[in-house]
Amino acid sequence: MASITVRCPSCSVTEGIVCNGKSTADHQRYLCKQCRKTWQLTFTYTASKPGTYQKIIDMAMNGVGCRASARIIGIGLNTILRHFKNSGPVQLRLGYIQISM
Ligand SMILES: [Zn+2]
């Protein structure tokens, strides 16, 4: 029997993780008994995966266009545009340089 070690994404514990039913797309959900957070490991849509929004920001900061970002990441163009519309102002501090978008 194969087993996987599931780690809580918020408090990083591996003990006290229990299965917590299925999502509407039939993916297994997990519950951390320490911090009471729930999450899932697999996603149907690429835009829902953790880290996708950070990829969008990183690609935009490196000069990749919206359409190219959508094609490379594998999500829709409207998802990219919605992210920029809803994200608000972003401030980055790169050493002594401060950039406001
Ligand atoms: Zn936790």
Image (cartoon, helix red, strand yellow):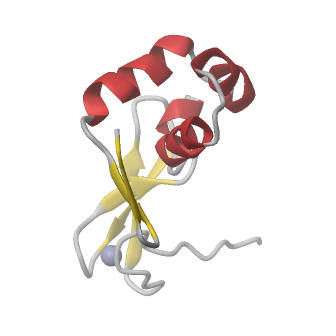
Picture residue at 26% right of the left edge, 82% below the top: 34
Q: Is residue 43 among what the camera can see? A: no
Ligand 1 found in image quarter: bottom left
Task: Provide residue 49's location: percent of width, then percent of height.
Answer: 53, 43
In the image, farthest residue toward the front:
96
On-image quarter of the C terminus: top left
From the viewer's side, name the closer residue of 27 and 92.
92
User: From what the image shows, is residue 60 above or below residue 9?
Assistant: above
User: From what the image shows, is residue 67 above or below residue 29?
Assistant: above
Task: Provide residue 99's location: percent of width, then percent of height.
Answer: 38, 50
User: From what the image shows, is residue 29 above or below residue 15?
Assistant: above
Picture residue at 43% right of the left edge, 69% below the top: 9
Task: Provide residue 84's location: percent of width, then percent of height.
Answer: 38, 27
From the viewer's side, name the closer residue of 100 and 5.
100
Picture residue at 37% right of the left edge, 20% below the top: 82
From the viewer's side, name the closer residue of 85 and 90.
90
Looking at the image, residue 91 sits to the left or right of residue 56; the answer is left
On-image quarter of the N terminus: bottom right
Picture residue at 41% right of the left edge, 75% below the top: 17
Q: Is residue 55 among what the camera can see? A: yes
Task: Provide residue 47's location: percent of width, then percent of height.
Answer: 52, 32
User: From what the image shows, is residue 91 above or below residue 89?
Assistant: below
- Say how many tags the image has: 0
